[in-house]
Image (spheres, grey):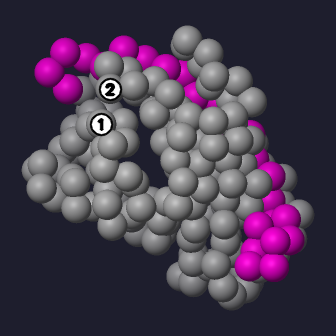
């Protein structure tokens, strides 16, 4: 597990990054030392809401496109897993962390410009597992894709 939890940020950088990406200060403990993560940072994901039962974030379409000029299907999955794993982490508390074990996504509509909003809703918040549904929409509220993510909740190793 040590490799999973490596790459810690210094405390000031950690707090700054989380705040810049919309994570409220009272939830920083759900992201112990690792910030929002390099992929979410690179994709421009910004949280607007984050609780165990509901999380919302936005992501720009550009530069997250595939060669055909529309938002890459993998980008939908990154947004969905970022939301669900973060919500699961808030549910888990600082003594545990969430590990994604399953994701499936169905893409209903393409998008070439603008901003995507992901809305994550808990379907199950258990002691060892969470399941969330994430719906991605465009700026007009049209559904772009639907994903379901399962996270396993693990005990954080001591000193991590």
Residue at 59%, 41% in the rendered image: 84
* Residue span colored magenta: 137-160
Residue 114, given in percent of the width and then of the height, sits at 66, 85
Name which quarter of the figure residue 143 lies in.
bottom right
Quadrant containing the N terminus in the rendered view: top left
The local crowd at label 2, few if under 14, some if 14 to 19, many if 20 or more residues have their Cα within 10 Å, is: some
Q: Is residue 10 left or right of residue 130?
A: left
- In the rendered image, residue 126 lying in the magenta stretch gets the answer no
Using the image, determine if residue 116 lies above or below residue 104.
below
Q: Which mark is residue 94?
A: 2
Residue 78 in view, yes or no: no
Residue under label 1, please give it. Answer: 29
Q: Quadrant of the C terminus?
A: top left
Q: Which residue is depicted at the point 56% across and 34% down?
A: 52
Q: How many marks?
A: 2
Residue 134: give x, y in percent of width and height.
72, 48
User: Can you name the residue that lies furthest to the front here?
Assistant: 26
Which of disc 2 and disc 1 is earlier in sequence?
1
Estimate the spatial distance between the alpha carbons at disc 1 and disc 2, rounded to whole Å.
Answer: 6 Å
Q: Residue at x 10, y 50 (%)?
A: 10
Binning the other alpha carbons within 10 Å of mark 1 as few (below 14), some (14 to 19) or many (20 upward) gives some
Residue 63, label in figure: none
Say left or right for 19 vs 67: left
Residue 152 forms part of the magenta stretch: yes
> Which SS class for mark 2?
loop
* Residue at point 55%, 13% (across, down): 128
Please indicate, yes or no, whether residue 86 appears anywhere in the rendered image.
Answer: yes
Viewer-nearest residue: 110 or 96: 96
Question: Based on the displayed image, in which of its 4 quarters is residue 22 positioned?
Answer: bottom left
């Amino acid at each position: 597990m040590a490799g999973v939890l490596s790459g810690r940020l210094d405390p000031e950088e950690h707090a700054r990054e989380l705040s810049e990406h919309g994570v409220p200060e009272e939830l920083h403990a759900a992201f112990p030392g690792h910030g929002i993560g390099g992929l979410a940072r690179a994709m421009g994901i910004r949280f607007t809401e984050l609780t165990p039962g509901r999380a919302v974030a936005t992501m720009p379409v550009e530069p997250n496109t595939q060669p055909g000029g529309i938002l890459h299907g993998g980008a939908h999955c990154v947004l969905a897993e970022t939301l669900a794993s973060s919500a699961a982490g808030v549910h888990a508390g600082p003594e545990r962390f969430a590990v994604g074990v399953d994701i499936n996504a169905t893409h209903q509509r393409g998008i070439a410009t603008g901003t995507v909003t992901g809305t994550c809703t808990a379907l199950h918040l258990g002691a060892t597992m969470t399941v969330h549904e994430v719906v991605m929409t465009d700026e007009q509220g049209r559904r772009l894709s639907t994903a379901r993510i399962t996270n396993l909740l693990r005990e954080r190793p001591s000193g991590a």
